[in-house]
Image: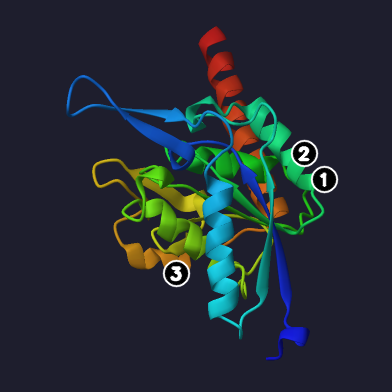
């Protein structure tokens, strides 16, 4: 493919904190560590720009990736602090974003919760492909951190979007794109996996459109509310 005719993929990256953008500080006790955010500019943009520069040169048969970075005011936190209000604010920023390709760097502890909440708050007819990514170890730890591979896998996923067939919210970790709706975090093994006994079930997990997921969540909540009312009425008899 000639460089002149090369397709361009523009991606907006929302930087929202988390372990990936932290620095590790050793505590007095050798086995303990404390993660704190960088003072000043986040580290993620610099590393991602370097990755994209290499990808664009080494993969001339693939679309050229161009990045834009946004660090939303008031939304740079540990993932445990991402309340519903903050996720609504992030959803509004994503709705207003000109790009249809979005990456959100985020803490992994509550990434599943944040991703599912974001689906709830998007426009029902959402046209954007949004991918959450992060890491178990800080990006600042160097190539040994899982952050490097997670960011690289996320960028490559936007080349053709084969793993992201519908415009909705995904997660990209452990070198693969995953559907957050059915994920759990295995704390013992520090990994994400699909609910159920067999991981083969992953292939059977449907990817909902945003509106389908919103309708399913609404129906579930209405069912729970009706059950509570029924129980309350029974107690009054």
| Disc 1 to disc 2, C-alpha distance | 6 Å
Among numbered discs 3 and 1, the one appearing first in the sequence: 1
Q: Visible in this render: residue 237?
A: no
Q: Secondary structure at mark 2?
A: helix
Vertical side of 112 occupied by 30: above or below? above
Residue under pointer 2:
92
Q: Residue placed at 56% from the left, 39% from the top?
A: 42
Q: Position of residue 90 (x, y in %)?
A: 69, 37
Q: Position of residue 186 (x, y in %)?
A: 31, 45
Q: Position of residue 201 (x, y in %)?
A: 39, 64
Kindly indicate the quadrant of the structure image that contains residue 116.
top right
Vertical side of 94 occupied by 87: above or below? above
| Disc 3 to disc 1, C-alpha distance | 33 Å
Among numbered discs 3 and 2, the one appearing first in the sequence: 2
Q: Residue placed at 57% from the left, 29% from the top?
A: 82
| Mark 1 residue crowding within 10 angstroms, few (<14) / some (14–19) / many (20+) | few
Q: Are marks 1 and 2 in contact (CB under 8 Å)?
A: yes
Residue under pointer 1:
96
Kindly indicate the quadrant of the structure image that contains residue 34.
top left
Residue under pointer 3:
203
Nearer to me, 173 or 57:
57
């Amino acid at each position: 493919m000639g460089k002149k005719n090369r397709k361009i993929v523009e991606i907006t990256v929302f930087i929202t904190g988390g372990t990936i953008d932290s620095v590790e500080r050793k505590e007095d006790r050798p086995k303990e560590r404390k993660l704190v955010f960088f003072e000043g500019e986040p580290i993620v943009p610099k590393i991602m720009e370097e990755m994209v520069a290499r990808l664009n040169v080494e993969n001339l048969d693939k679309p050229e990736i161009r990045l834009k970075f946004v660090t939303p005011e008031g939304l740079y936190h540990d993932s445990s602090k991402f309340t519903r209000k903050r996720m609504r604010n992030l959803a509004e920023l994503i709705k207003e974003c000109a790009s249809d390709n979005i990456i959100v760097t985020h803490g992994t502890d509550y990434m599943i919760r944040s991703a599912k909440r974001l689906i709830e708050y998007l426009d029902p007819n959402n046209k954007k492909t949004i991918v959450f990514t992060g890491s178990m170890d800080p990006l600042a730890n160097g190539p040994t951190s899982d952050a490097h591979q997670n960011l690289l896998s996320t960028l490559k996923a936007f080349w053709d979007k084969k793993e992201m067939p519908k415009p909705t919210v995904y997660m990209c970790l452990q070198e693969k794109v995953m559907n957050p709706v059915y994920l759990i975090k295995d704390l013992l093994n520090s990994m994400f996996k699909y609910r159920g006994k067999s991981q083969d079930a992953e292939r059977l997990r449907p990817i909902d459109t945003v509106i389908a997921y919103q309708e399913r969540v609404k129906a579930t909540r209405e069912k729970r509310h009706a059950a509570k009312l029924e129980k309350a009425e029974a107690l009054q008899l």
